[in-house]
Amino acid sequence: MPVISELLKLLDLEPLEVNIYRGQNRDLGTGRVFGGQVFAQALVAARRTVDEPREAHSVHGYFLRPGDLKAPIVFFVDRPRDGGSFTSRRVTAIQHGEAIFHLSASFHVAEEGLSHQTVMPSYPEPESLRPELDLLRERSEQLPDALRNVLTQDRPIDFRPVPLGLNGDTHSPKRAAWFRTVSPLPDDTIIHQAIAAYASDYGFLPTALLPHDIAIRDPRLQLASIDHTLWMHRAFRADEWLLYVMDSPSAAGARGFVRGELYTQQGVLVASVAQEGLIRLKDGRHSIR
């Protein structure tokens, strides 16, 4: 099966009953369900219950428990409100009888209104950068044996990280990457929104590690997303290049805060992202629990 078909299959949830859906998992090498996957699937489940042509504009998720890769996820959708302009949905993701994730989403009819945006930062164009997958495959012998095949497998999304230190400071809590799917996608808006939701959690929280010179696989480190929020401002396609600009204004209390912006290659700001996550060290003063 082509790798993009595998991602689309993950997002094509199986209806079990009214407001109840089931989704499968894909292993990305973390030993647990990738947070972006359950976030995207919950968004799809919510949109399945919206009958009118309204698209998501605000999506908030809380990660409650690690997801089990070997078990399907069941999504229960609650319908708090269907208003004249906005529709609200709540989704609970369940495994083994316990909630692993909560999502709240708001959908809005298309309207014209005031418009402004920040200017897209200047970074190298994606065509001038190498795919992250190629970089990983080149140093595959340095990867842990148990993860080598998973980390170097074909990917449905082509991530092209901007090299750190373009401003002369490799420890600045800022990074950027371009991404798009490796193949064209259907025109359905929710597919593009869900894939952006999926991709927005990839490598996001580690931005908060950059000032501390700590690698993501440092054995002292416990890293986990706590919550994740995505606001979608304008229409976009996930099979066209999107620039993901990330920064971390704060880390404190064993938590790191990161935020991001998504721009089209033409400089249009299409989405904003924010996340707080656990960053806990075992170094004599802190213990991993």
Image (tube, grey):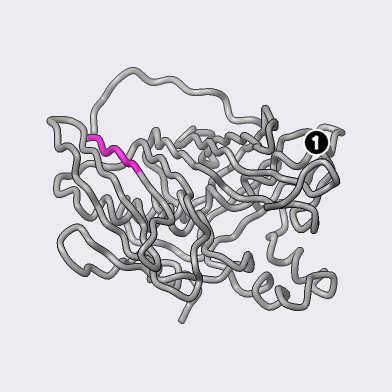
How far from the left and from the top, in percent, is residue 10? 40, 68
Residue 19 versus residue 107 in the image, above or below = below
In magenta, the rendered stretch is 104-108
Q: Residue at x 52, y 66 (%)?
A: 156
Q: Residue at x 41, y 40 (%)?
A: 60
How far from the left and from the top, in percent, is residue 114? 34, 17
Circle count: 1
Q: Residue at x 83, y 37 (%)?
A: 171
- Amino acid type at image mark 1: Pro
For the residue pair 258 and 175, the one nearer the viewer reads as 258
Q: SS at mark 1?
A: helix
Main secondary structure along the magenta-highlighted residues: strand
Asked if residue 193 is among those painted magenta in the image, a careful observer would answer no
For the residue pair 112 and 24, the one nearer the viewer reads as 24
- Crowd around label 1: few <14 · some 14–19 · many ≥20 (10 Å): some
How far from the left and from the top, in percent, is residue 52? 15, 45
- For this orientation, the residue located farthest to the top is 114
Q: Residue at x 39, y 65 (%)?
A: 95
